[in-house]
Image (spheres, rainbow, N blue to C red):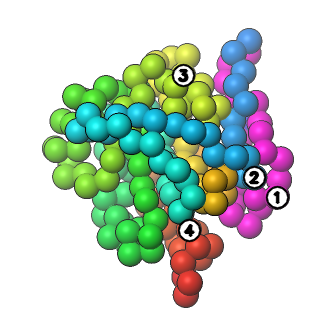
Amino acid sequence: MVVQITLAGHAAATQRRVGVPGQHRIMLEPGAPAPDISAQNQFGETVSPDFDAPTVLYFYPEDFTGGCTIEARDFQEQLPQFREGGITVYGVSMDDVATHDEFAEEEGLLYDLLADPDGTVAEAFGLDTSGGRTDRRTFVLADGEIKSVYDPDISDPDGHAEAVLRDVRNEFVQGG
């Protein structure tokens, strides 16, 4: 099991095995280079983050489910503060563009939800996609590398965005 890795601890190893026996993936950890990814958002537009500026990329299992809806609402509530600090937020799940569009519309989400139906983006970060869903996991990236990783067992969906915002502001925004 992976524990929360804080921004201050980014000198740790850069990879950890995750997944089920026989299907291990190498999950990216602080210090690892950010992968090159590209995916369509809820509007069908192709998005290719460069991860140079501070970015939060949170993976969640599925649109319209309890914990995922709480987490999405939480990021939306904190979105003005993220943007004020120059921090981009992306949500990613294995749902398709149409489902993301419905979910974003229903929840009033103003940040990009990246559709990853084949699991390519999740697998680039070393997440297990064998069950057709990804685990809840949040990556903070900047300067082209992973800065921190939040474990779902530690990060309750309710209040998670606020905790990530606090950490990212302390690390990347002058005056915290």
Q: Quadrant of the N terminus?
A: top right
Q: Residues within 10 Å of mark 1 (few under 14, many from 20)?
A: few
The amino acid pointed to by label 4 is Val
The answer to the question of whether label 1 and label 2 lie on touching residues, with beta carbons closer than 8 A, is yes
Q: Label 2, label 4: how many angstroms apart (C-alpha)?
A: 16 Å
Residue position marked by numbered label 4 in the rendering: 168
* Quadrant housing residue 73: bottom left
Q: Label 1, label 4: how many angstroms apart (C-alpha)?
A: 17 Å
Q: Is residue 149 magenta?
A: no
The answer to the question of whether label 1 and label 4 lie on touching residues, with beta carbons closer than 8 A, is no
Q: Earlier in the sequence, mark 3 or mark 2?
A: 2
- Check residue 11 in the rendering and tell me which mark sits there, or answer none: 1
- Check residue 69 in the rendering and tell me which mark sits there, or answer none: none
Residue position marked by numbered label 3 in the rendering: 129
The amino acid pointed to by label 2 is Gly
Residue position marked by numbered label 2 in the rendering: 31
